[in-house]
Amino acid sequence: MRWWGWGEDGHAVRLPPVAESMLRDELGTDPATRRPPVGMEQVALPDSRLPEPARERLAAAVGVEQLRDGREERLAHAVGRSYPDLVRIRSGDASSAPDAVVLPASAEQVAAVLATCAEQRVAVIPFGGGTSVVGGVEPVRDGLGAAISLDLRRLDTTVEVDRTSLTARLDAGLFGPQAERRLGAEGATLGHFPQSFEYSTVGGWVATRSAGQASTGYGRIDELVEGVRCITPAGEVGTRALPASAAGPDLRELIVGSEGVLGVICEATVRVRRAPAARRYEGWSFRSFAEGCEAFRVMEQADASADMTRLFDEHETRLSMAIASTGSRSERLGRRYRRLRGHEGGCIAIIGFEGDEEDVERRRRRTSALLRAGGGVALGRRPGRAWLRSRYAGPYLRDELLDRGVMAETLETAATWTNLRSLYEAAGGALRAALGERGTPPLVMCHVSHLYPSGASLYFTFLARQEDDALAQWRASKTAASEAIVAGGGTISHHHGVGRDHRPWMRAELGELGIELIRAAKERLDPTGIMNPGKLLP
Ligand SMILES: Cc1cc2nc3c(=O)[nH]c(=O)nc-3n(C[C@H](O)[C@H](O)[C@H](O)COP(=O)(O)OP(=O)(O)OC[C@H]3O[C@@H](n4cnc5c(N)ncnc54)[C@H](O)[C@@H]3O)c2cc1C
């Protein structure tokens, strides 16, 4: 991945002219503004401070060529992929870069690296794909003399499918496409497709309790993990891969979501499904977000949800349609159709079914009847296909927006159905007020994308003209929204995790004693405090 953004060089997404004029009219951006990243040679990188004895022992543990302290490697591990990460790295600030990058190839090598780092007091930051959007992979030394980034991409050998039990043992360093390709060869799928799928790893998913785009049907990663193997500075903590157990509190729950602060997840045994023979994704339209939310609630509580469910509010519908705009005849007809049905200015939903042909058709009929009864109008397969084609395009578009001096940020939460509407208003309102007061009124959009019988997630995307002090602008909006989320009964994160950015709200999430309990586990497993300091725990 390129060091200043998403994807590889040469892969870009262009903003269509209609979206460009929308930004100009609504955010007041200047179309001539360009804020490209600085050249790599202009990035300020501190000298490596890894002590010589640590360097020698780490090289002995993993092989000298797998201990890297070149400019490019350190730069690529300096930050994750959040908006403030990109603002800093694009401006040439890599002050957080690790002193070295270490690439173990086995759990035994991971154990040897942790032993050396504990002895030499070197911080260890587990690094999967580095797609954290909460500051999870940025090295924080917290009083330690040096920090290494422990890049797990070489833990990518094992994909062992048990076709009878429908489980798979996966190495933690497998990237999404690698894992799915190899599962696909065995006729299986994990069904876990976060938007970061192309560049995130199995270990990263488990460490952050990630949710894929089709989590409504397939389940979040924490529901899919049956067993984990975790190497900590104090030794190995494993949980056996079992379908269920009543043998006391579930240790697996301590490791899943631990974000590298307890140890390194080296492999996970996950539930898989038979690869679907059929996929049917389609569009629906509702008169309003409130109407769509209610229809989704009824569908979910009737146990009739599609596998992928996404409802865009009025603002996101409008922008999505501008971005997807082709000006084609069928698009004009689609717009006319919605107008005729009284849905102009309303909301679009995309739902997707995966499975056997017969099963997909049977479920689709039942779901359609419920959505129709809830006021929905079917828009056919074209919008579904378009969504599938562009499901990973968002982050490329973000680079393009940053180039044009646009702040483009996302945040997410979840709440009960009872609280969802008020939380939607409160978080959106807080973003509008915080940025409006600064003279950079934003475009705030939201979608519902992961459904549960008792509630759903809300995912906000907001755009604003970037201020000169882009980080202060970001901090003000993030703080306002987070305060509103916690006060409004939402979780500080539905799937991005905690990292560094959400730490201030963890007390509200777990309570003081809850925090102490996790801290006690950390002190037992990581007595010298080398594991990902400054993350997760306030
Ligand atoms: C554009 C974009 C879209 C995204 N979309 C989604 C989405 O749809 N759903 C979603 O859930 N998230 C999403 N994310 C967030 C991110 O991709 C997830 O948190 C993902 O699970 C991180 O995986 P990773 O391999 O990149 O982990 P990293 O970013 O490398 O690490 C994340 C955290 O886990 C720790 N860690 C990583 N690997 C291990 C390991 N093996 N053992 C112990 N600790 C480890 C790290 O130290 C860090 O604290 C998105 C991010 C971006 C930039």
Image (cartoon, helix red, strand yellow):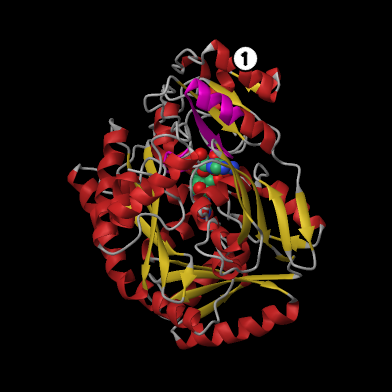
Q: Amino acid at mark 1?
A: Glu
Residue 393 position (above or below residue 360):
above
**Can residue 395 be seen in the rendering of this structure?**
no
Q: Nearer the viewer, residue 349 or 416?
A: 416
The residue positioned 53% from the left and 53% from the top of the image is 256
Q: Where does residue 143 sit, x and y in percent of width and height?
A: 37, 24
Q: Is residue 121 left or right of residue 166?
A: left
Q: Is residue 346 left or right of residue 27?
A: right
Q: Nearer the viewer, residue 92 or 222?
A: 222
From the image, tell me which residue sits under label 1. Answer: 56
Which image quarter holds the C terminus? top left
Q: Based on the picture, tell me whether residue 487 belongs to the magenta stretch.
A: no
The residue positioned 33% from the left and 52% from the top of the image is 443
Assess mark 1: CB under 8 A from ligand 1? no
Q: Disc 1 on helix, strand or loop?
A: helix
Q: Where does residue 123 sit, x and y in percent of width and height?
A: 48, 28
Residue 43 position (above or below residue 327):
above
Q: Where does residue 19 sit, x and y in percent of width and height?
A: 44, 50
Q: Where does residue 148 sit, x and y in percent of width and height?
A: 53, 25
- Location of residue 401 (image quadrant): top left
Q: Read off the magenta span.
A: 113-136
**Can residue 41 be seen in the rendering of this structure?**
yes
How many numbered badges does the structure rendering display?
Answer: 1
Q: Nearer the viewer, residue 79 or 208?
A: 208
